[in-house]
Image: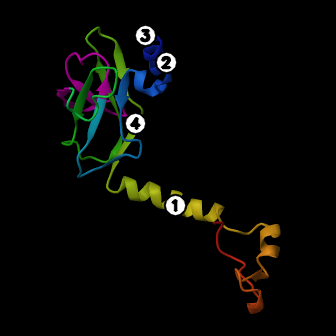
Amino acid sequence: MRWKNSLLNLLALPAILLAAGFRINQVGYSAQGPKFAIFAETYISGACEVVDATTDEVAHTIEYAFLDATEDWSALPLPTSRIDFSELTKAGSYYLRAKNMMGTPFQSEIFVIDDHPLFDQTLALTLDYFYHSRANHPHVWQRDSAVGFYNAPEKGTRDVRGGWYD
C-alpha cells in the first residue's frame, strides 16, 4: 500500500517540477541587481553561457555552483545547480545555454536584462487590470444609479455609477 501512495504523490507533482532545464526570472533581471538562474538536471558539464538573443553571440561565460539539499531548490526531484551571472550588466535579450554530463544541450527561454524590468512590465499590466475591471456594463451602470443604504432604507438611494467591480 505504501508504494501506491508514493506513486500517487509522484503523479500529483506538477510537470514543471519533473522537467529538466533552466528556471529563470520570467519578468527579467535588473541590470545592476543580482542575476541567478537554476539548472535542474544532472550536473552541468563545463561552463554555462549567457547568449545574446539578437546576435547569438556569447555575452558572458559563467561557472556554476551545485546546490545541496539544504538550499531553496531542494524540493525538486532533480539535482540543481545555481548559475550566477550578476556580472553581466548590459541591457538586452539573452538566453542561457549549457550541456549536462551526458552532453545533452539545454537552452533557457529568452529573458531581459534592463534598468527597471519589474516596473516596466507590471505598471502596464496593473493599468490593464484596472481598465478591464471597470464597472461599465450597461446592466451594472443602470443598477448602480440608485443603490440603497444597507439596513437603512429611510436614507434613500445614491448614484454610485463608475468605479470598479468588487
- Name the residue tied to disc 3: 3
Q: The disc labelled 3 sits on which kind of residue?
A: Trp
Q: Residue furthest front?
A: 1
For label 1, the crowd category at 10 Å Cα-Cα, with few meaning under 14, some 14 to 19 and many 20 or more, is few
Which of the colour schemes (rainbow, by chain, secondary structure, one colour) is used? rainbow
Structural distance between the alpha carbons of marks 2 and 3 = 9 Å
Mark closer to the chain start, 2 or 3 = 3
Structural distance between the alpha carbons of marks 1 and 4 = 29 Å
Structural distance between the alpha carbons of marks 3 and 4 = 49 Å
Disc 3 is placed on an element classified as helix
Structural distance between the alpha carbons of marks 1 and 3 = 46 Å
- Name the residue tied to disc 4: 54
Residue 86 quadrant: top left
Question: Dividing the image into 4 quarters, which one contains the C terminus?
Answer: bottom right
Observer-nearest residue: 152 or 33?
A: 152
Q: Is residue 5 above or below residue 16?
A: above
Residue 60 quadrant: top left
At horizontal 52% and vertical 57% (from top left) the residue drawn is 125
At horizontal 20% and vertical 23% (from top left) the residue drawn is 47
Q: Is residue 5 above or below residue 73?
A: above
Observer-nearest residue: 157 or 90?
A: 157
For label 3, the crowd category at 10 Å Cα-Cα, with few meaning under 14, some 14 to 19 and many 20 or more, is few
- Magenta residues span 39-68
The residue mark sitting in front, 1 or 4, is 1
Q: Is residue 130 above or below residue 117?
A: below
Disc 2 is placed on an element classified as helix
